[in-house]
Image: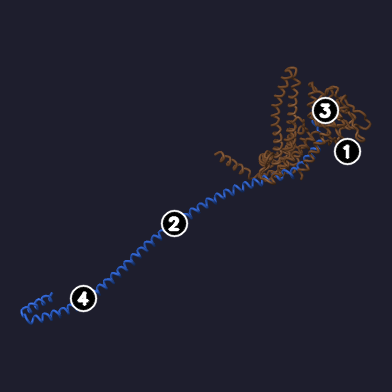
Amino acid sequence: MLDLINDFSPGLFFMQALILIILIVLMRKFAWKPILNALSEREEGIADALAAAENAKIEMANLEASNQAAAQEARAQRDEMLKDAREIKEKMIADAAGQAQEKADKIIAQAQDAIEAEKKAALADIKSQVADLSVDIAEKVTRKELSQKDAQHALIEQLLAEANI
Amino acid sequence: MFRAYFKIAFFALIFTAFATAQAQEHNGDYAFDDEIESDGGKVNTKEEIDSYIDHHLKDSHDFHLFSYSDDAGVRKHVGFSLPVIVWSSEGLKFFMSSKFHHDDDGKVLVNAGDATFTKLHSKIYELDKGATAINFDADHHPTNAHRVFDMSITKSVFGLLLIGLLMLLVFGALAKQYKTKKIPTGFGRVLEPLVLYVRDEIARPNIGETKYRKYMGYLLTVFFLIWISNLLGLTPFGFNITGQIAVTVCLALFTFIIVQFSGNKDYWMHIFWMPGVPVLMKIALIPIELIGLLTKPFSLLVRLFANITAGHVVVMGLIALMITLKAQFGIVGSTGLSIFLTLFLSVIELLVAFLQAFIFTMLSALFIGMAVAEHDHHEHAGAEEDDIDEVRERFI
């Protein structure tokens, strides 16, 4: 112990203290401060990046969900549109059919009218011709009657019978 | 810019070192060869080995690398001298240690101005006025000389300067790397985990998340200073910086001062008026706590000093086995045994070098943490319960 105290050199102690103080001051300024700052900065950066990644993940999930919703909506819309289109098509077909029917009916009706008119004209024509013919016949018959009384009677009888029918 | 400045300073230092080393060799040729080298300066007996180890453990005023005998049988020393700066009765004196001519027994006297100095067992003495030679009493203590305040750039101071410069260069470079990139490259990649280790394993858990930042400068500096010092002590350069009691006293004193200055109200309360115990007990605890205050830094300084000194003694003793066991095992046997055991112990010492730096820094951080800790006596019980719950949860 005495040897130890004897070995203690105040000069060395002084130099060590001096060097240590200077070294601490210099190291703090030129090494430890920038190193520790950079390290904590980097750690904060890493923590931030991790948090950002986590956020991005959540956002991604949200986005995907909303995407899915949008897709669902789009699909529904498409179905609706298709349904509408089908309805319109059917309606159009139905409409066209109706119109066609109508037109056809109209044409038929016109045709019937025309036929009726023609028939009437023809009947009139026939009537006039019949009258003419009757007159001719009567003329001829009258001419012949004058020769045959019995035949005249028979004819009249015949005519009358016909007229009854 | 600073880096360039340091580089220049570093190379200048090395240049002067080699320049003086050469001068030293020339000096040795004619000045003191015949005086000291009569015994060859070789270390061959047990007593010589003991004194060599003893001498190594002390600080020295010159940087001695190795010695050899040339063809003519003249002993030559290779190394360089370091400046001696002493505060004597005649004021500040400055001269190179080469003036002592490797003498360590008070035989060579150096006149610097009006004062005369001599070196005895690695310590510089100033001779009293009128004395022409040093006289010893029965215990080999000088009677007509006294020790001076020795601020020399001794081997330890030189080592400290070297380490300081190295730390500034290496960690300054690391700091500079962060300006351009987030992750350091090259050697910085080795240093960064060490800095992180000190921060995350030593400072944070012991001082606390909110307060640790203020003490990082001291803890990091001390950790790397001690570690590199210890490692340098394992090199053949023979530094023994942390084995100097003055160095460890200084380091422990720094911790002590920092702890006292950062102590909060609770800290002083626990020393002078321990809460939660009867008044009589409080009074009885004061001296005990005061002793505890002093034993903490004392244990720090003794632990570091003793571990490093013991390591050096054992390693040197094992190296010396090749001489001490030569008679029993022969040259090859003793050398092989010595190499094997030294290698084995050196590996352990490598671990001890780190461990001591770690323990010193760890305990410093712990003492600082104890001084700055916030105690909450009223909610203490509740907090403990919480902790138990937490622990239980962790197990379940």
Q: Which residue is mark 2?
A: A76
Which chain is in brown here? B
Where in the figure is residue A21, as x and y percent of width and height? 78, 41
Q: Colour of chain A?
A: blue
> Which chain is indicated by disc 3?
B
Where in the figure is residue A11, as x and y percent of width and height? 83, 36
* Secondary structure under the numbered disc 2 in the rendered image: helix
* Secondary structure under the numbered disc 3 in the rendered image: strand
| CA separation in Å, label 4 and label 1 | 165 Å
Q: Amino acid at mark 4?
A: Leu
Q: Which residue is mark 4?
A: A123
Which comes before the other along the chain, label 1 or label 3?
A: 3
On the image, which quarter does residue B222 sit in?
A: top right
Same-subunit check for callouts 1 and 2: no
Q: Amino acid at mark 3?
A: His
* Secondary structure under the numbered disc 4 in the rendered image: helix
> Which chain is indicated by disc 2?
A
| CA separation in Å, label 1 and label 2 | 100 Å
